[in-house]
Image: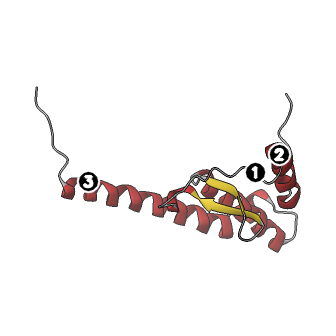
C-alpha cells in the first residue's frame, strides 16, 4: 500500500487553485448580477431596484458560505455578530444570560427583522 505525503507546497498549491476558482466564481456572478440579471429577471421594473434585488441574491449566496454567531455583549449591552471563521480566541464564562435565552432570541429577531421559524 502506497501512502502519499501532503507536502506544504502541495497543500499551498491546492489551496491556491481552490481559492482562485472560488474568487472567479464570485467575480463572474457579481458581474452578471449587476449587468445581466436586472435586465433578464426584472425587465419591467426600475433599473436601480432591479440591480439591488440582483445584488441581494448575490449577498445571500455569499453569506451561505459564512457562519455567523450572535452573542450578547455585556460591555456594550447589546447584541453583536461575529464571523466564526475569524474567531481566534474564545473564553466561556460561567455567567448566565441576563434574561431567558428564548426571550433574548425573540428580542434579537425583532431588532434584526428576522421572522420566527415556521412551526411546520
Please report the residue visible at 52 percent of the width from the left and 60 percent of the height from the top.
87
Task: Please provide percent x and percent y for residue 45.
Answer: 88, 66
Query: In whole angstroms, how far apart are the C-alphas of marks 2 and 1?
Result: 7 Å
Q: Is residue 90 visible?
A: yes
Query: In whole angstroms, how far apart are the C-alphas of marks 1 and 3?
Result: 42 Å
Would residue 109 be found to the left or right of residue 58 on screen?
Answer: right
Please report the residue visible at 83 percent of the width from the left and 43 percent of the height from the top.
102
Mark 3 or mark 2, whichever is nearer to me: 2
> Furthest-bottom residue in view?
48
**Quadrant that contains the N terminus:** top left
Label 2 sits on residue:
100
- Answer few, some or many: residues within 10 Å of disc 3's Cα (few below 14, many 20 plus, some between 14 and 19): few
Q: Are marks 2 and 1 in contact (CB under 8 Å)?
A: yes
Helix, strand or loop at label 2? It is: loop
Q: Quadrant of residue 61?
A: bottom right
* Front residue of 119 and 2: 119
| Count of number-bearing discs | 3
Would residue 18 be found to the left or right of residue 87 on screen?
Answer: left
In the depicted structure, whether residue 23 falls above or below residue 69: below
Q: Earlier in the sequence, mark 3 or mark 2?
A: 3
- Answer few, some or many: residues within 10 Å of disc 1's Cα (few below 14, many 20 plus, some between 14 and 19): few
Q: Quadrant of residue 39?
A: bottom right
* Front residue of 5 and 74: 74
Label 1 sits on residue:
97
Please report the residue visible at 51 percent of the width from the left and 62 percent of the height from the top.
86
Label 3 sits on residue:
11
Q: Earlier in the sequence, mark 1 or mark 3?
A: 3
Helix, strand or loop at label 1? It is: loop
Amino acid at each position: 500500500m502506497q501512502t502519499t505525503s501532503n507536502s506544504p507546497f502541495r497543500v499551498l498549491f491546492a489551496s491556491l487553485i481552490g481559492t482562485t476558482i472560488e474568487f472567479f466564481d464570485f467575480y463572474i456572478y457579481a458581474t452578471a448580477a449587476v449587468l445581466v440579471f436586472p435586465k433578464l429577471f426584472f425587465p419591467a421594473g426600475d433599473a436601480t431596484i432591479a440591480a439591488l434585488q440582483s445584488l441581494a441574491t448575490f449577498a445571500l449566496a455569499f453569506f451561505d458560505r459564512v457562519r455567523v454567531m450572535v452573542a450578547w455583549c455585556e460591555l456594550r449591552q447589546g447584541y453583536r455578530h461575529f464571523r466564526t471563521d475569524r474567531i481566534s480566541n474564545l473564553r466561556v464564562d460561567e455567567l448566565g444570560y441576563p434574561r431567558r435565552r428564548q426571550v433574548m432570541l425573540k428580542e434579537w429577531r425583532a431588532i434584526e427583522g428576522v421572522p420566527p421559524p415556521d412551526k411546520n
